[in-house]
Each structure stands twice: as structure tokens, then as C-alpha cells.
Amino acid sequence: MSIGLISVIIPVYNTPKDKLAYCMSSVMSQTYSNLEIIIVDDGSDKDVAEEADEYAKRDKRVTVVHIDNSGSALARAKGISVSNGDYVIFIDSDDTALLNMIECLAEAIQSTGSDLALGRLSVISEYPKLTVNKVDYDIKTYSNLEALEHLITCNGIGSTPCCRLAKKEVWGDCPFLPESLHEDLASTWEVFERCNKVAVCEIDMYFYYHGDQSSVHHKKNSKKFCVDFWKAFYERHENLLQRYPQMKNADSFSCLIYCPQIWSANYNSYCKDELKDLSAECVNLFKSSWADGKKYAKQHCLKWKKYILFRISPYLYNFIYSMWRKFRGIRK
């Protein structure tokens, strides 16, 4: 089974060698072998850049492109511009995947006639043993607008660009926002617009590493993280309503999902006093979306009652949600 050459694009910026090794092992050992593996070194330190070059020496399928530090969005765009594959998939340099992830996605595209196939993502704090999936799983297919609706309501489709195998033309000019910590939230939905059909593999096949809690905590408590989070979501919100007014209720439910997250990020940040106006905008958008969002959730049997607490008091919601996370052992 083959759908042609697949370009795997891996942006790298000062990724620790051990983490990059896990990522590269999972990519170079894929059961689908007709790959072009493009490492885009985004201005890393000399030792990391040299380590990336070593992979090109070990495997003739690997190409390394060195660029000045520009951020992951422009690094992905550079990878697309130099790629030769019929299809493109992104993998972050500290993540890993099932050894037959690309084969599974390629089979889903071929069997369903889809332009894009994606699998589920699992968050990990320790790297799992690299394995091949041997368990049967369902493949669901959606039209582009159905997939878009599932995306914005977080109903089985996330906003990450990773673990998505798509025709090169579907990625287009790579619409990710440069210099934003949430470039995927604002723009990956546009990729679905360019598809006729989307296939979803109902199995965890991509593993997102979330182990460096100190750096993650620092990033999430920065002003830029909070401001970018709001800007990315609000830009998507406005663009969706302008292009697809028929999705108003689905977008309203999306506001019920994201506004509490954004408000909590602001409140728990080191600079919450500087973000008061942004937090107020967030609460206002939540309240104006409440009726339509709740109606949509009820119609589609989606969970919505937990957001009643935020409607009553964002502070109480944040306190109880934080205690729940602590009880479940979920670190920030």
C-alpha cells in the first residue's frame, strides 16, 4: 500500500538530544518507508544543529534545513516550501508516535478517499516504548464542514497540526500565525476548509511530551501566553462567524469551552493585574454565548453543566477546577 512520497516535517529549536532521539527513532522506524524527513533547524545552538546534521548522515531520507530563529510557524512553512512529497505531516521534535502511525493514516486516506487523515493524541510525561499498533480501530469520515464543527467544539478533533497527514496542497502556504504561542488555534481550522473529506482514526497514535513542567509552567504564566491565547481564539471566533454564520451555535459552545480556560490562564499568571481588561472581555463573550452554546450542547449531547459554575463566578470556577486538577494529580 502506498500513496506516494510523504514529507515528514520536524521543526527543531534547541531540543534536548535525548528527546530528539526518541522523536527521530519513531520517525525513521516508521513501517511506511517512502518518506522524506525534513528537519528544520530553527536557529538552534551549535551542538543541537550538529546533532540534526548527524541524522542526515545516518539516513539518506533525512534532510536538514538551517534557518535563523523564526518560530515554529515559519519553520513549518519553510519545511513545506522545500518538500517534495505528495503528502505532508508535522511532528514536533520532542514528541513520538506509533511506529505505524503514518501507515495507518495513509491507509485511512486511501480507503476513504479523504484529503486529510488524523489520529488521536495522547499527553505523556515519560516516553513509551516504541511499538506498532495491532488493535483494530474505527475510522470515521466527515465532510470538511462537519470536521470543522467537530474541531471548534473539541469533539474528537483538536487544533494541533501534528498527527495530520494531508495532501500538500491542503496545507497550502501553511497559515500558522508567526510569533504566536497559539498559532495552531487561530489557523489550523482553515486547513479543513480545503478538504473535501476528512478521516479520523479512533486510536491514540501520537504522543505529546509534557514532561518539562518547569518550562511549561513558566510559559503558561507569561503575559504573552495569555494574550496570544485570547487573540488566537478571538480571531478564529470572528472569522468563523463571518464565513460560516450557520455555525453560530457551535461557535457559541466553543466560547463556553475556551473562555473559562483563557480567564483561568490570565488569573493564574504572574501578571493578572495587567490582564484585567482582557479577562473582562472573556467573561462578556462567555455570557453573550451562553444561551446558544447551551442549546447546541444539549442538541449534540455534549457536556456543558460544568460551565454553570463559571457563569456564577469565574473565581469559584477557577478554585474548584484547580482543586480537581490537584486531586487528579494533573500538573499545570
Image: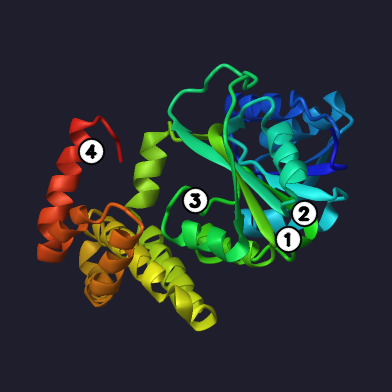
Callout 4 amino acid: Arg
Task: State the CA–CA distance, disc 2 to disc 4.
Answer: 39 Å
Res 176 quadrant in image: bottom right
The residue located at (22%, 71%) in the rendering is: 283
Residue pointed to by mark 1: 170
The residue located at (23%, 53%) in the rendering is: 268
Q: Is residue 234 left or right of residue 291?
A: right
List x then y, in percent, for residue 265: 29, 56
List x then y, in percent, for residue 86: 85, 50
Res 134 quadrant in image: top right
Res 97 quadrant in image: top right
> In terms of depth relative to the viewer, which is nearer, 199 or 92?
199
Q: Earlier in the sequence, mark 4 or mark 3?
A: 3
Callout 3 amino acid: Gly
Neighbours of disc 1 within 10 Å: few (<14), some (14-19), many (20+): many
Callout 1 amino acid: Val
Up/down of 197 relative to 250, above or below: above
**Which one is closest to the eye, mark 4 or mark 3?**
3
Q: Is residue 25 left or right of residue 289?
A: right
**Which one is closest to the eye, mark 2 or mark 4?**
2
Callout 2 amino acid: Lys
Furthest toward the front, the residue is: 299
Q: Earlier in the sequence, mark 1 or mark 3?
A: 3
Q: Tell me the tag on residue 158.
A: 3
Q: Tell me the tag on residue 325.
A: 4
Q: Are marks 3 and 2 in contact (CB under 8 Å)?
A: no
Task: State the CA–CA distance, disc 2 to disc 1.
Answer: 5 Å
Q: Tell me the tag on residue 67.
A: none
